[in-house]
Image (cartoon, grey):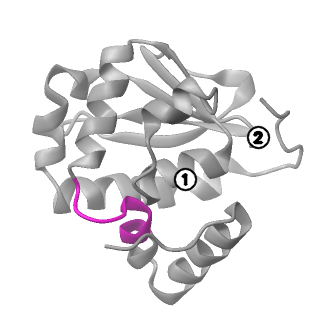
Amino acid sequence: MPSPVRFPLPLFILQPILARIVHRVARDEPSVFNRLGPHKHTRYIIDPANLPFVLQLHPDPDNLVLRACPRTAIPDHEARISGRFFDLLQLVDCDQDGDAMFFSRGLDISGDTEAVVSLRNALDDLDGSLAARVADMFGPPGRLMLSTLRRAAGYSAPTT
């Protein structure tokens, strides 16, 4: 994995954005939690290995958490998904094959593999791109940011 980007990032700026994202997805797609089954109580770490923070996800509808955590204080978790930021973005934006990414070493899965598979399946059941839905939450600036990230990652918008 590449070493993390080294720049100061005040994570408190990200927290309300991440909270808005997870609560909106929960409101718009409550069935995603049913798809997770018992794994909705799992604590996940999503680790964009080339960024200076990780994301903690606890998809329990009664106690939703999506927050950025410094690498120096990674919370306890049962499952971890690590990869380059652009690879993780493609997983939630395209029909990217997570299994192929894992076996090509683009992703590193640790901990409760069954929970990771359940999360991936739950996200796959959503219609369209989760990344596009999140971008739409923030209007034109969000869509511009997603378009910029797609170009930087070397791919275009998925076809529906």
- Residue 129: in magenta span: yes
Residue located at (42% from left, 14% from top): 78
User: Picture coordinates of residue 103 (x, y %)?
Assistant: 55, 24
- Residue 128: in magenta span: yes
Residue tagged 2: 50
Residue tagged 1: 89
Q: Magenta segment, which residues?
A: 126-134
Toward the viewer: 113 or 34? 113
Q: Which residue is the extreme one toward the top?
A: 111
Which is nearer the N-term, disc 1 or disc 2?
2
Label 1 is placed on what type of residue?
A: Leu
Mark 1: secondary structure: helix
What distance separates the C-alpha of mark 1 from that of mark 2?
13 Å
Q: Are marks 1 and 2 in contact (CB under 8 Å)?
A: no
Count residues near mark 1 (Cα–Cα under 10 Å), then give few for <14, some for 14-19, many for 20+: some
Count residues near mark 2 (Cα–Cα under 10 Å), then give few for <14, some for 14-19, many for 20+: some
User: Picture coordinates of residue 22 (x, y %)?
Assistant: 35, 52
Residue located at (52% from left, 77% from top): 142
Residue located at (31% from left, 34% from top): 119
Mark 2: secondary structure: loop
Instruction: State the mark number for residue 26.
Output: none
User: Picture coordinates of residue 157 (x, y %)?
Assistant: 49, 74
Q: Which residue is the extreme one toward the right?
A: 6
Q: Is residue 34 left or right of residue 133?
A: left
Toward the viewer: 100 or 157? 100
Q: Is residue 127 above or below residue 68?
A: below
In the picture, which quadrant includes the C terminus? bottom left
